[in-house]
Amino acid sequence: MLKKLGLVGVALGVIVTASGWFLPSKTVVVRSITIQAPVQTVVYLVGHLPEHEKWSPWKAFDPTVKNTYSNPSHGVGASMTWRGEKIKTGSMTITDMREPQLIVAELDFGANGKAQSAWTFQPSDNGVNVTWSYEADNGNNPLKRYVALFFIKRKIADAFDLGLTNLKHVSEQVAESQQSETYHIPDMIPTHFGVSN
C-alpha cells in the first residue's frame, strides 16, 4: 500500500512539474486609473522618487520598510533602495524618462531576480490616464512559474491597485490645493518640470 502511495506521489510530482513548463514564462501585470489632475503633477509624483513616500503601496504591506534615494533623485539614472522585514531588500533605477509620457525603471530583487516597471501617462478630457505595468522573466524553473502565477502576480496586482488609488488621491488633492489661494504648504508640488527635491 505504501509503495502504491509512493508511486502515486511520484506520478503527481512528475505531472505537476511537467505542467509547470506550460505556464507563462513571464509575469506581466498591467493596471490603469484615471486621475483628475494635470499630467505634470502626476508625472512629478512618480518621476521624483522621494515623492513615492506619499503614495507608494509598499508600506501598507510592510510598515518597517525604509527607503534611501540617490542624489539627484529624478531623471534617468536616479535610484532608490529599500529594506524591510517582509519585502527584504531591493532597488529601483530609472532607465528611461520621456516627460510627460513615460517613465521606465529596472527593479532588482537580488537573488530573486530583476523586473521592469513602467508608467505611461495619457492626457484625457477627465485628466490623465495612468497605466502602471510590471514584467519579469520566470526562467525555466517550473516551481518559480507556479509561484509567480498563483502568488506573486496577484500580490503585485493588489499592490498596484492600491498604489494607483493612492496616487489618484494625492494628485487630485495637490491639484485642488494648487488652485486654492489659501494653500501655503512649503513642499507644494510644482506644476512645471525642472524643480527637484
Image: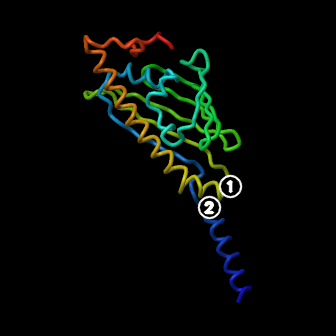
The residue at the far front in this view is 64
Residue 184 at x, y = what percent?
A: 33, 11
Residue 82 at x, y = what percent?
A: 61, 32
Vertical side of 77 occupied by 194: above or below:
above
**Label at residue 46:** none
Q: Identify which amino acid the numbered label 2 is placed on.
A: Gly
Label 1–label 2 contact, CB within 8 A: yes
Specify how the rendered protein is coloured.
Answer: rainbow
| Residue at position x 69%, y 39% in the image | 110
Vertical side of 183 occupied by 2: above or below:
below
Whichever of callouts 1 and 2 sits on the residue coming sooner in the sequence is 2
Residue 73 at x, y = what percent?
A: 56, 18
Q: Nearer the viewer, residue 16 or 85?
A: 85
| Residue at position x 29%, y 28% in the image | 36
Q: Quadrant of the N terminus?
A: bottom right
Secondary structure type for disc 1: loop
Density class for disc 2 (Cα within 10 Å; few <14, some 14-19, many ≥20) is some
Q: Quadrant of residue 83?
A: top right
Q: Is residue 83 left or right of residue 163?
A: right
| Residue at position x 71%, y 43% in the image | 111
Q: CA distance from mark 1 to mark 2?
A: 8 Å
Vertical side of 15 occupied by 162: above or below:
above
Q: Identify which amino acid the numbered label 1 is placed on.
A: Asn
* Labels in figure, total: 2
Residue 112 at x, y = what percent?
A: 67, 44
The residue at the far right in this view is 3
| Residue at position x 45%, y 19% in the image | 99
Q: Quadrant of residue 23?
A: bottom right
Density class for disc 1 (Cα within 10 Å; few <14, some 14-19, many ≥20) is few
From the image, tell me which residue sits under label 2. 20
From the image, tell me which residue sits under label 1. 141
Secondary structure type for disc 2: helix
